[in-house]
Amino acid sequence: MKTCLTIAGSDTIGGAGIQADLKTFGANGVYGMSVITALTAQNTLGVDGILEVPADFLEKQLKSVFSDIRPDAVKTGMLSDPEGIKIIAGFLEKEKAENIVVDPVMVSTSGNELINEDSIKAMCDYLLPVSDIITPNVPEAEKLSGIKIGSEEEMLSAGEFLRNKFKCDVLIKGGHLDSDPQASTDILFFEDEKPLCFSSRRIDNTNTHGTGCTLSSAIAAGLAKGMNMKTAVHRAKIYVTGAIKDGLDLGKGKGPLNHFYKTGEKNADQIKR
């Protein structure tokens, strides 16, 4: 069985972070492992607190995983400590880890800032250059590129800039753009090919807590199973769209997706047949 490692923060309600990643790995047929970077006190309404894991203990967790069950792909999520980011990047580079997917988490779905400028700099200096693909949303792509994004044309400019700067594939998620209220477009910049657009109709569901975590984890699962980047992203998009369309409605704010929509109660009769 192929294996995936998530390096990210914990989410108390299980919709994002480590919990979402492990659910996504399982739903996409790979064995999931985790290195926890921070504990959070959060729910669908917001983040009440963050407790960072010391950098030296991050390294111990990484060594425990790689010395026993080497991952076929690695996904990183919330990383809020500059020293921890340096350790993670250095370890992955030293171990020649493959299929590294970096979700540069900077702001929660509820709007809370999760990372400071020092951490952004450490991410740019150490982690992004060792990644295979980064998956910023529009606000994150703006921070990383310094380019204001208000259209697909500006998404193209930012994506090309990031790909040239960090020498990795880039997927910019366009859900934050309001230029088209009926549809959203994600753009993949990969290999030496022209940018590839993934356009879809917007789903009438505000429960999108953990969408970015879920997408990047699904991409990692696809890469672990031997898919090329184009296929892994395409399959991940289909999976996330289904998890949103399922219409799970939990919590008083922006609720989580249904990561197991394919095997849920609605499909039980079909599975038995």
Image (cartoon, rainbow, N blue to C red):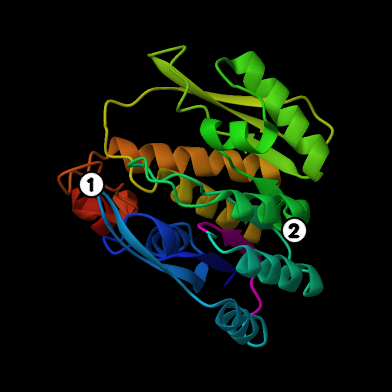
Q: Is residue 135 above or below residue 156?
A: below
Residue 247 locus on image (x, y percent): 23, 39
Residue 248, magenta (yes or no): no
Residue 67 locus on image (x, y percent): 67, 87
Q: Is residue 208 left or right of residue 178?
A: left
Q: In what element is the residue under mark 2?
A: helix
Q: Is residue 98 above or below residue 196?
A: below
Instruction: Tell which of 144 and 271 is nearer to you.
Output: 144
Q: Is residue 130 left or right of residue 40?
A: right
Q: Earlier in the sequence, mark 1 or mark 2?
A: 1
Which region is colored magenta? 70-78
Which quadrant, please, contains the N terminus?
bottom right
Instruction: Tell which of 166 and 196 is nearer to you.
Output: 166
Q: Is residue 65 left or right of residue 41?
A: right
For the question of whether residue 127 can be seen, the reply is: yes
Q: Is residue 86 above or below residue 69?
A: above
Q: Quickly name the residue at label 2.
A: 126
Residue 73, magenta (yes or no): yes
Residue located at (52% from left, 44% from top): 236
Instruction: Tell which of 226 and 89 is nearer to you.
Output: 89
Badge number at residue 157: none
For the question of whether residue 226 can be seen, the reply is: no
Residue located at (16% from left, 49% from top): 251
Kindly report the distance in space between the C-alpha atoms of the residues bearing marks 1 and 2. 32 Å
Residue 87 locus on image (x, y percent): 68, 72
Q: In what element is the residue under mark 1?
A: loop
Residue located at (33% from left, 40% from top): 208
Within 10 Å of the Cα at label 2, are there few (<14), some (14-19), or many (20+) other Cα atoms? some
